[in-house]
Amino acid sequence: MHRYVQVLRNTLLTVVMASLSAIATAADKHYTVTSPDGVTIAVQESGDPSGPAIVFIHGLLGSRLNWEKQTGSAELQRYRMISYDMRGHGLSGKPDDAAAYRDGRRYADDLATVLKASHAQRPVLVGWSLGGIVISSYLAAYGDTAISGAIYVDGVIELNPALITPHPPVYAGLASDDLKTHLDALRTFLALCFHTQPDSATFERLLSNAAMASWTMTRTIPSMTAAVTDGLPKARVPVLMLYGSQDALLQVQPSLARARQLNPRIQSMLYEDSGHAPFLEEAQRFNRDLADFVEQALQAHGTLP
């Protein structure tokens, strides 16, 4: 079976590489960095290299392709937009050892490595879904002195069953060794990300993208450690919790309540017509709100150019 999986991955790599080539006009450059434990992290930059920096962190089974509505937005081209593939995803390294994915600190170190290598000056972090855990883990390990603010986009506050909508057959399918079962679960999981489904070309691209992810990583994420109670309270910079009210994967109000327990200073915003992916479902609105937040965060720290 592993031979078939490798063939599938190679085919999907070709598809994603073609997608990356198609958006090359919006991307200034692609490069890789190496995390402290030796994992290669693929990075993309677009927009104005001298503009205020925004760093995008995707969610489970995603990649930097998730942010095309932002990196390709004319409205956001004045910013330096940095996106990267988390370990086990996209074009980044995919270790076979579960230990490479279990410790949330490793994801924090990956983000810190991207920030250091890119020389981004006090960027705003934008983390979708699992990317919220990455931001909290980063705050726990490094504090907030190197960033201007953070947006949790339908962010996972904690890997706590009380905050996550149960879909037992889907998550069992994602962990399955059976190829058909696994791929069918990927399709169902991706559909659950949207209240308003994307066009078919976008959905198929994101599905191919999800199928490239490491199976070892996918199985390990439920047991991933997350230093949320140490991280989120450390944020003195502006923090926005932005959720789609129709989210089918997270419990929105309990997540917001838990975030406020950990950090009463957070701001919140709800998109009534979006599900788990408001940056795709209501991209124009999201891009305006993102730009407004970036300006607010920079003004708060006197770092507007």
Image: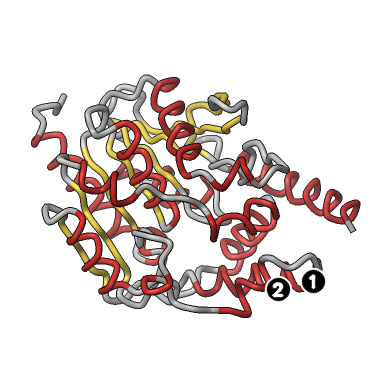
Task: Tell me if I can see residue 195 in this picture.
Answer: no
Q: Nearer the viewer, residue 265 or 114?
A: 265
- Residue type at mark 2: give it: Asp
Q: Tag on residue 184?
A: 2
- Residue type at mark 1: give it: Lys
Q: Is residue 277 left or right of residue 140?
A: right
- Circle 2 packing at 10 Å, graded few (<14), some (14-19), many (20+), is few
Residue at the spot of label 1: 180
Residue 59 image point, x, y percent: 48, 54
In the rendered view, would you say 284 is above or below 189?
A: above
The residue shown at (40%, 51%) is 133
The residue shown at (34%, 57%) is 153
Quadrant of res 176: bottom right
- In which quadrant is the N terminus drawn? bottom right
Quadrant of res 32: top right
Q: Are marks 2 and 1 in contact (CB under 8 Å)?
A: yes
Residue 77 image point, x, y percent: 34, 37
